[in-house]
Each structure stands twice: as structure tokens, then as C-alpha cells.
Amino acid sequence: MRLSEQERAANRAAFRQMSAGQKAEYVFAYYKLPLVIGLVLVVALGTVAWRALTHKEPLLYLAYANVVPTPALDEALGAGYVQSRGANPRRSEVLCYRELYLTADAESANHQYAYASKLKLMAAIEAEQLDVALMNQEAYDLLSASGYLAALDADLAGNPLLRSNDVVLSSNAVEMELGEADQLDAEIVRQANALEVTDAALLQGFAPGERFYLGVIANTPRRAEALAYLAYVSGA
């Protein structure tokens, strides 16, 4: 029911005579729902604005496969590359998949973790959200054999760091494991599909005794960017 002017004036006078605590209690009691709705809207708008201001677009997706970089190396391989490309570090980033462990050793104590890492890697590749991989020798052998790495001979012909590895085109390994075949029958080719970056300036002093390789994922939609990343890391 709409109040008369006299009633509204009386309510205003009564409100002025209330203590601060009484006023707060009155406002909360009568305007609780609008206040809650207003607060929710303010928080929602603030969240949207914050995400818009802080959101970074991936310039490149990088996987560390059996590689645990130091903070300094991680910075150089991420923010360092963004800076080298002249991109805005507040708007662009190298999105990294860390703590990926790959092994073909079924007896490994970390076999379950390796299986989870493989699934994560395959999901990223399927979603076309993986462009390059920094790998140790074991990871390089596995990713190459699975056909996940792109051939680089046409793009990097004559590059002294270019390395070749086996790519399994077909195999009856599953049938062998199931006892359905007496001997392994596989079609394997050699393919130049990674740069050895062990001695690259960015990796100097990192994990002595290990060898490291940088490859481009075969289905990347950002091949030109991936090749630029190889040139950055290798110092070419």
C-alpha cells in the first residue's frame, strides 16, 4: 500500500531519531533482499572486470616431458620468449604443461603417474592446445615413436642441431602382448623431428649428463610460432 506524504514524513522523522545501530537494523530488515542482490551484482561485475584485465592469451603451448626446469629456466622459456616476440607480457603468455612424466617401463614405480601424464598430453594434442615439447631422451623416443612430432627437415634443412628418431607407422605390439602374435612385426621409418638443445645458451648448466630435445607437435595450428620458438631456444 502506498503511504501518504504525512506518513512518509513521520517515518523519516522516526528514522532520524534512531541510533546508528537501530538505523542499520532497520535498513537491513526492510532492504535486505535489494542489498544482497546489489552485493552479488557488484561481486560478479568485479570478477568479470578482473578477469578481463588479467586474462592472458596463449602465444604458444609448451610441454615439459620428463623435464623439471629451474625457476630461472622456466622464466626464460616462458616470459623470455614473450618478450623476445615483442608481445605484451600482460596480455600474452607461453602456457606450460609441467610435471609430465613419460615412460614405457611397466614396472616403474611411477607407472600410474606416467599413464595419467600420457592421457593429459593426448588430450592437449587432441584439443590442438600443444605446440612444442621440451623432452629428455626417453620422452623424445616415446613421442617420436607415437608419431606426435612433426617432420622438420623441410623447414630446418642443414640445421646442425636437427636430430632424427624412429617413427612407428604400424605395429602388432598389442597382439604380441595379448599372445595373438608370435613375433613383433612393425613398420618403422627414421624422421628428422627435433632439435637437440642440450648445449643451447638457455640450458647451459641445466641437468648435466642429460640430453634435451625440442620438437614441434604434428597437429599444431601455430606451426610458424612453434618454429620461431625453436629458433629462440636454440639460438639460431
Image: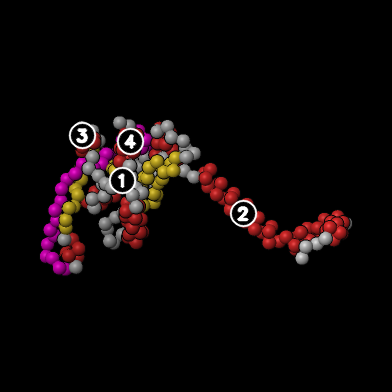
Residue type of the residue flagged with mark 1 = Thr
Per the image, the residue denoted by label 1 is: 220
Tell me which numbered mark, 4 or 1, is placed earlier along the sequence: 1
Up-down relation of residue 87 to residue 108 (above or below)? above
Q: Is residue 181 magenta?
A: yes
Per the image, the residue denoted by label 4 is: 228
Tell me which numbered mark, 2 or 3, is placed earlier along the sequence: 2
Looking at the rendered image, the disc whose residue lies closer to the viewer, 4 or 2, is: 2
Label 1 SS? loop
Q: Mark number for residue 88?
A: none
Residue type of the residue flagged with mark 4 = Ala
Q: Mark number for residue 41?
A: 2
Compared across the picture, whether 64 is left or right of 150 comes to right
Residue 119 screen position, x and y as percent: 33, 58
Cα separation, mark 4 vs mark 2, equals 44 Å
Residue type of the residue flagged with mark 3 = Ala
- Front-most of residues 100 and 168: 168
Per the image, the residue denoted by label 3 is: 157
Tell me which numbered mark, 2 or 1, is placed earlier along the sequence: 2
Label 3 SS? loop
Magenta segment, which residues?
179-205
Label 2 SS? helix
Badge 2 local density, few (<14 within 10 Å), some, or many (20+)? few
